Image: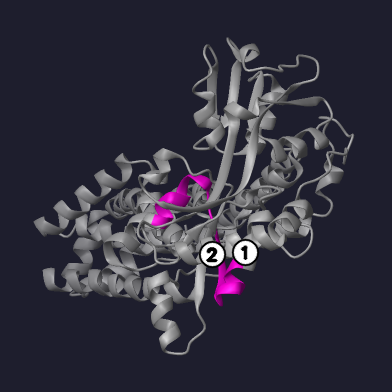
């Protein structure tokens, strides 16, 4: 009997492995991250006469340096992109862009996901301990942004005030030196705008070009420059330690400074400070008009990711539940330990570990969407295993005994008798898990998957307004949940017709 039980376990396990292997090649579309080719490998490619390629990491939520052109092409544009394109074209490389959170850029360099990083990154001493930098290509000034009704103009005026900064930025490091200031660190520039507008912070410290964009799109805000001698920051290109292409980039940067190409690109992207909008902070959904097609494309990615994660979690959760009731002690111990670990650690931690640790440990550049599906599927399976086990145990024991007495094989008994009844019992719990997956899918935006939340962040960084786009995607999520719930109710009624 145990051999038949193991066969029943092996079949879905094999199907699961085949599914995972196929996902690696089938799902890396509609993702803002990309496949990485390293400087060392490009040299080998050149020898073989193939097209050389470099992958640039960036966080495309910091206009005018880098942002997504959501109104038209959806491509990443900005000052850093133009400089990178010029340098790589001069060196004969093909450029590929990998978009991700700013906080993950250094980790991506260290794990070999990208060959270099350009994201308005200052060459600080702390960062030099982990990466190499090129010569600087632009020097920015730190700027105080506050409300016109309560302007803060000097560093001394920030003492005793709540000051917002972008986590990990140079402005964040600078703000730590302001005596008496109470710091609030947020992940994105649009978050600072929202906190400033709601009165949770008194001022935000950002660099000059970003401050100009913020104040031009939010007329009730005002900007004041900090003294240049205490706040100048040089932006540079970051490379992995001992990268062989640093000198090549420095050579082209020097040429750009000499022939005026760098000044031309800077003048192209820095606005003249004129006001672009005067709609104030009142809710104005008209700003979303040109962004709606870009946002709606995220629905497909969100649904695809939820479907893949749910199927993966269901298959693997079924295997784990069979482990738990198999009577084979090693399998029971494994399933119990697995459930304990995945239910006892945060999902976001599991997601980032899988995405960043896989290339480092296994030398496999796992696609972002596959990493997300794997993390959510593994986590969901831990919960579903208990749900499915409960459903199986809820089936009348007499039916199992009767099947054994009639000589029905174990696999047939489980597939034809036990599972259908268990599924009917646990269907509401399965629907709840799918709804939870759908809503929690917004977490995948941290590794660059272009789902609804990621696209909303892009629009927020473009418009420096948050409420409108957040309300819009909240409505989309709610409609999706209503549709999913409606389908589940229809299925549940259909299954209960036999009662």
> Which residue is labeled 2 in the image?
251
Vertical placement of 409 versus 175: above or below?
Answer: below
In the visual, does 25 lie left or right of 392?
A: right
- Disc number placed over residue 40 in the picture, else none: none
**Residue 468 locus on image (x, y percent):** 76, 39
In magenta, the rendered stretch is 87-109
Please tell me which residue lies in front, 353 or 266.
266
* Quarter holding residue 413: bottom left
As for residue 30 lying within the magenta part, the answer is no
Vertical placement of 476 versus 312: above or below?
Answer: above
Please tell me which residue lies in front, 137 or 398.
137
Tag 1–tag 2 contact (CB < 8 Å): yes
Please tell me which residue lies in front, 498 or 311.
311
**Residue 183 locus on image (x, y percent):** 53, 21
Say which residue appears at 33% left-offset and 56% top-offset: 357
> Which residue is labeled 1 in the image?
255
Dot 2: element? helix
As for residue 91 lying within the magenta part, the answer is yes
Dot 1: element? helix
**Residue 14 locus on image (x, y percent):** 29, 75
In the visual, does 6 lie left or right of 152?
A: left
Give the residue furthest to the bottom: 49
Label 1: how many Cα within 10 Å (few below 14, some 14–19, many 20+): some
Colouring: one colour
């Amino acid at each position: 009997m145990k051999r038949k039980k193991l066969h029943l376990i092996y079949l879905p396990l094999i199907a699961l492995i085949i599914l995972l292997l196929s996902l690696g090649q089938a799902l890396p579309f509609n993702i803002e991250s990309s496949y990485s080719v390293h400087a060392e490998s490009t040299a080998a490619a050149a020898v073989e006469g193939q097209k050389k390629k470099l992958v640039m990491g960036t966080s495309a939520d910091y206009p005018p340096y880098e942002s997504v052109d959501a109104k038209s092409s959806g491509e990443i544009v900005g000052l850093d992109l133009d400089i990178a394109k010029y340098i790589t074209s001069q060196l004969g490389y093909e450029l590929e862009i990998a978009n991700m959170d700013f906080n993950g850029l250094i980790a991506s360099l260290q794990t070999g996901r990208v060959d270099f990083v350009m994201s308005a990154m200052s060459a600080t001493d702390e960062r030099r301990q982990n990466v190499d930098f090129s010569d600087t290509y632009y020097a920015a000034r730190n700027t105080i942004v506050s409300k016109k009704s309560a302007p803060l103009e000097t560093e001394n005026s920030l003492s005793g005030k709540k000051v917002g900064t972008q986590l990990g930025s140079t402005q964040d490091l600078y703000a730590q030196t302001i005596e008496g200031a109470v710091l609030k660190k947020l992940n994105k520039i649009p978050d600072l705008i929202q906190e400033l507008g709601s009165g949770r912070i008194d001022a935000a410290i950002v660099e000059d070009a970003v401050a100009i964009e913020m104040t031009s799109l939010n007329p009730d805000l005002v900007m004041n420059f900090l003294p240049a001698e205490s706040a100048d920051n040089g932006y540079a290109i970051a490379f992995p330690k001992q990268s062989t292409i640093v000198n090549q980039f420095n050579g082209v940067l020097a040429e750009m400074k000499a022939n005026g190409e760098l000044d031309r690109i800077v003048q192209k992207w820095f606005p003249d400070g004129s006001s672009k909008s005067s709609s104030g902070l009142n809710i104005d959904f008209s700003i979303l008009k040109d962004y709606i097609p870009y946002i709606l494309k995220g629905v497909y990615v969100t649904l695809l990711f939820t479907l893949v994660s749910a199927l993966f979690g269901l298959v693997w959760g079924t295997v784990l539940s069979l482990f738990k009731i198999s009577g084979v002690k090693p399998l029971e111990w494994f399933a119990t330990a697995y459930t304990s670990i995945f239910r006892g650690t945060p999902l976001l931690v599991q997601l980032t570990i899988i995405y960043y640790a896989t290339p480092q440990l296994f030398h496999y550049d796992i696609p972002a969407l596959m990493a997300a599906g794997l993390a959510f599927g593994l986590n969901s399976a831990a919960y579903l295993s208990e749900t499915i086990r409960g459903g199986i145990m809820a089936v009348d024991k007499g039916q199992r005994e009767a099947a054994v007495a009639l000589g029905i094989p174990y696999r047939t008994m489980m597939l034809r008798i036990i599972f259908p009844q268990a599924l009917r019992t646990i269907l509401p719990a399965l629907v709840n898990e799918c709804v939870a997956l759908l809503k929690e899918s917004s977490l995948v935006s941290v590794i660059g998957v272009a789902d609804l939340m990621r696209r909303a962040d892009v629009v927020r960084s473009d418009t420096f307004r948050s409420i409108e786009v957040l309300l819009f995607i909240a409505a989309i999520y709610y409609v999706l949940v209503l549709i999913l719930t409606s389908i589940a109710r229809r299925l549940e009624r259909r299954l209960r017709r036999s009662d």
